[in-house]
Amino acid sequence: MAQKLKQINDISIGDNLRKLRNAANLTQEQVVAQLQLRNLPTSRSVYSQIEAGTYNIRISELIALAEIFHTDFNTIFNGLIHDK
């Protein structure tokens, strides 16, 4: 069973992923193609949901996105400290 990270309404990595994608000058379709090359079947609709924070991203997808964007997890999770 694939492990997933649940994105909650007020804590989402989607904005950071969108910024990283834009910084890499990639379209959502290009990111999806890169995920598919890594044997991670993903549609543009699903990837759009990841950036919107409404999709519980799989850890395998997160690892692949870090590779695609040439970044690390600290950057992906930057600014997401949540105080309760």
Image (tube, rainbow, N blue to C red):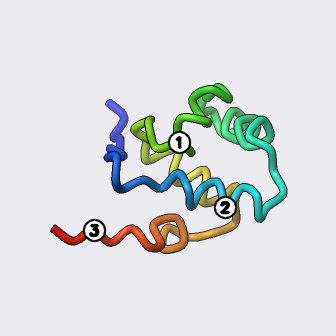
Mark 2 or mark 1: name the one nearer the start of the chain.
2
Looking at the rendered structure, the kind of residue marked 3 is His
Position of residue 37 in the picture relative to residue 3 (left or right): right
Q: Which residue is mark 3?
A: 82
SS category of the residue bearing label 1: helix
Vertical order, 1 against 75 (above or below): above
Residue 67 percent coordinates (x, y): 65, 59
Q: CA distance from mark 2 to mark 3?
A: 20 Å
Q: Residue furthest right?
A: 25
Residue 56 percent coordinates (x, y): 40, 38
Q: Crowding at label 1, few (<14), some or many (≥20) Cα neighbours within 10 Å?
A: some
Q: Which residue is mark 1?
A: 52
Quadrant position of the C terminus in the picture: bottom left
Looking at the rendered structure, the kind of residue marked 1 is Ala
Q: Which residue is mark 2?
A: 19
Looking at the rendered structure, the kind of residue marked 2 is Lys
Residue located at (69% from left, 33% from top)? 36
Callout count: 3
> On residue 76, which mark appears?
none
Q: CA distance from mark 2 to mark 1?
A: 12 Å
Quadrant position of the N terminus in the picture: top left
SS category of the residue bearing label 2: helix
